[in-house]
Amino acid sequence: METKKQVYRLQGLSCTNCAAKFERNVKEIETVVDAQINFGASKLIVFGEATIEQLEKAGAFDGIKVIPAKQRTEEQRTPFWKKRTNITTAISALFVLLGYSAQFTAGENSVLSIGLFALSIIIGGYELFKVGISNFVRLQFDMKTLMTIAIIGAAFIGEWSEGAVVVFLFSLSEALERYSMDQARQSIRSLMDIAPKKAIIHKANKEYEVDVEDIQIDDIMIIKPGQKIAMDGIVVKGQSSVNQAAITGESIPVHKQVGDEVFAGTLNQEGSLEVRVTKRVEDTTIAKIVHLVEEAQAERAPAQQFVDRFAKYYTPAIMIIALFLAVLPPLLWNGDWSEWIYRGLAVLVVGCPCALVISTPVAIVTAIGNAARKGVLIKGGIHLEETGRLKAIAFDKTGTLTKGTPEVTNMELIKDISEEELLGIAAAIERHSQHPLASAILREAERKAIDIEKWQVGDFRSITGKGAKANVNSDVYYIGSPTLFAELLDLPAHVQERISRLRTEGKTVMLLGTNKELFGLFAVTDQVRESAKAVIQSLYKLGIYKTIMLTGDNHATATAIGNELHLSEVKAELLPQDKLTTIKKVREEFGSVAMVGDGVNDAPALAAATVGIAMGGAGTDTALETADIALMGDDLAKLPYTIRLSRKTLRIIKENITFALGLKILALILIVPGWLTLWLAIFADMGATLIVIMNSLRLMKVKE
C-alpha cells in the first residue's frame, strides 16, 4: 500500500535549527511515516497522516503556521517592528538600558538594577528558555541549549547585566537572521506570484472570469493587451508581442501568432490573443520551474553536507570544552570558581554555531533564486558547486552552437534555367519530403515569394540517405546529394570542384536535375548563433581551458564551424555512444566537464558529464527533467553568467565557512586569558552571523 504524501507551506520558520527540531517533532507523530523539511523554500512534505492541528502543535515552539500547498492563501506580511518576537526584543533592550541606569543611581548590585536585568532576561529569553530547557532535558544539544545554560549560569554567578545583554543580542541576531532568510526566499515567492490567479475563459459565446484551478485543458482563454497569460497554451486566434522575460530571461518580446506556444506568467503586450489551454495549472512551465527551484534549494550541496556533519560533533565538543574550562582550573590549580565558570559560559556563548550553520544554505538559496529569475534553472547546490569548478566544456553542434534551422546560402545555375524555375521545382519536390534540409529549400522559396503550385508533383519517392525523385509536370526530376548524381551521370569537373569548395566551407550541397543533365545546385548550412563566438571568448576569459564540439555532422562542416568559433577541439561524425566515450575521456583529463546540448538526443552525454546543461528549457519537459542546468530562453549567452554565478557562490561559501570558524577559534583563544566578556562573545557571534548572511546576499546582485 502506497504511503500518502502531503505537502505544506510554512510561515514563521525562523532558523535551520528550528527547522531540524520541527522535522523531528513531526516524525514523532504516530501516524507519520516520514517527514522532510525544505528550509530554503519553507515547505514540509509529510508521508502518512497528520492534521494541521498536529503539525502546528509540533511547530508551536517557533510559532510555525502550516498551510496545505494547494490552498491559495495571501501570506500576511507583518512589518518587521510589529512581529511579536521583535517587540519582546525591543522591550528586553529597554529593561537593559533601565538596568544600567539603575546601576548608576542605586548601585551596581542594587535590588532595582538586578530586578530590571532579570525582567529583561525573562521577557527577552522566555521563548529561548522554553526550547533550551526542553532540549537539555532530552539531551538534545543545539545553540538554544548552549545559550540557555550560559544565561542561567551568568545569573547564577551574579552577572545579571551580562546575562541580560546576551539575551538581547541573541534575540536581535535571530530577528535579523529571520529577516535575511525572508529576503533570500523572496526569489521563490516572486516566481510563484508571476502567473495570475484568474483568467477570462470564452464559452458558449460568453466570457467568464474563473480561477486557474478550475480551467480545463482545451478551454479557450482571452488575453487582452497588457494582461498576463494565466496558463500554458497554443495561440488559436490573433497575434501579439509577448514578453517572456519572467520564464526565459529574454529581454526582447517574442512575436506570437496562430500555432505558437505561450507560457503562464508571460505578459501580452499590444495585441489581443485567444489561447487554447494545453496544461493544467500544476503542470505549467512556471509551476514546474517553481517546483524544481524549491527542490534544488532543499538539496544539500557538498559544502553544506560538510557543515552539517561538522556541526553534529561541534556542539557537544563546545559543551565539553566549556565544562573542562569551568571545572579543571579551580580543581587542579586553585583557580577562582566564579571567574572560571564565567569563562566556561563565555565558551558556550561564543561556540554558538549560528554563523557556521547558516553559511552555506543562505548562499545556495540566494544563488539558485537569482539564476531562476534570469532564465537559468539550476537543479541543486551540488550542480552549482560543480559548475564553479569547471575547466572543460563540450558542446553539441546542432541547436546549441548553431540555430538548428538550416538555410540556403548559395544557389547556382548549371543549365540555362531561371532561378525561379530551379527553386520552384526543388521546393515542389521537397514539399513532400521529411528531410531537415527540405525545410531550408521551402523557406527560401517562401522568402522569394515563389508560387510552387505552378509545378505539379506526382509519384514522389524518397531515396534513403541520398535524396528524392518525383514527376514534375510529367518529367522525372532528382534532388539530392552529389553521391546520388554520381550514380546517375558523370559530374563535370568544374561542378565537382565547386562542390568540394563549398564543402570545405562547411556547407551541405544538394543538386537538382534529371538522370541525363544537371540544372543547378544549392548549398545549405545551419547558421551559427550570433552569440556563439562571443560566448566562447567569454569562457576562455573565465579560465575554461578546453572547448570541444561533438557532432554527428561531417568533418568539413564541423571543422569550418570550429574554426569560425575558435573552439579548441572538434570531433565529427560521432554516434551517441562516441559522444559518451569522448565525455568520459575529457572528464578523466580535467576532473570535471560540462556537456551543453538540447536535452533530447544528447541524453547519454548529458548524463555522463559532471554537469549536464540543456538548451531551450521553456516548454521542453525533456530538458527540464534530464539536465542539471536548463537555459530556459535557449540563449547560449546565459552560460558565462551561470559559470560566474557558480564561481562567486563557491567563493562566498568558502569565505563564510572560513570566517565563521576563524572567528570562533580566535574568540576561544581570547577567552582563556579572560579577555572576552560574555556580551562581547555574543556580539562576535551575532556579528559573524550577520556578516555571513550579508555576504551571501551579494549573490542577488550577480548580473548577466
Image (tube, grey):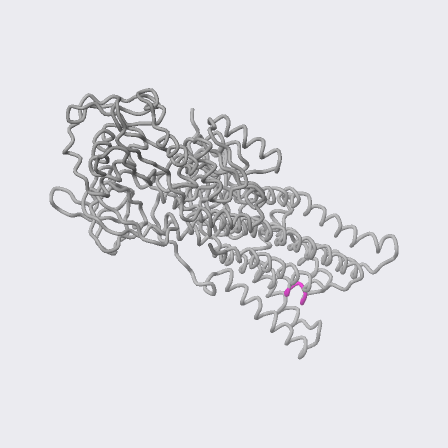
Q: Is residue 623 above or below residue 367?
A: above
The residue furthest right is: 333
x then y, percent, for residue 505: 42, 38
Residue 206 is one of the magenta-drawn residues: no
x then y, percent, for residue 428: 21, 31
x then y, percent, for residue 5: 42, 34
Query: With 477 as the anchor, is 393 left or right in this view?
Result: right
The residue furthest front is: 493
Q: Nearer the viewer, residue 276 or 448?
A: 448
Residue 124 falls in which quadrant of the image? Answer: bottom right
Label count reads 0
Q: Nearer the viewer, residue 107 or 562?
A: 562
Q: Is residue 305 visible?
A: yes
Residue range corresponding to the magenta coloring: 161-165
Residue 163 is one of the magenta-drawn residues: yes
Q: Nearer the viewer, residue 560 or 240?
A: 560
Quarter of the image where the N terminus is located: top left
Q: Is residue 58 visible?
A: no
Q: Is residue 584 above or below residue 214?
A: above
Query: With 412 as the anchor, is 9 left or right in this view?
Result: right
Residue 463 falls in which quadrant of the image? Answer: top left
x then y, percent, for residue 437: 32, 33
Determine the main secondary structure of the stretch shown in magenta.
helix
Query: With 437 as the anchor, is 56 left or right in this view?
Result: right
Residue name at image x 66 percent, y 55 percent: 659
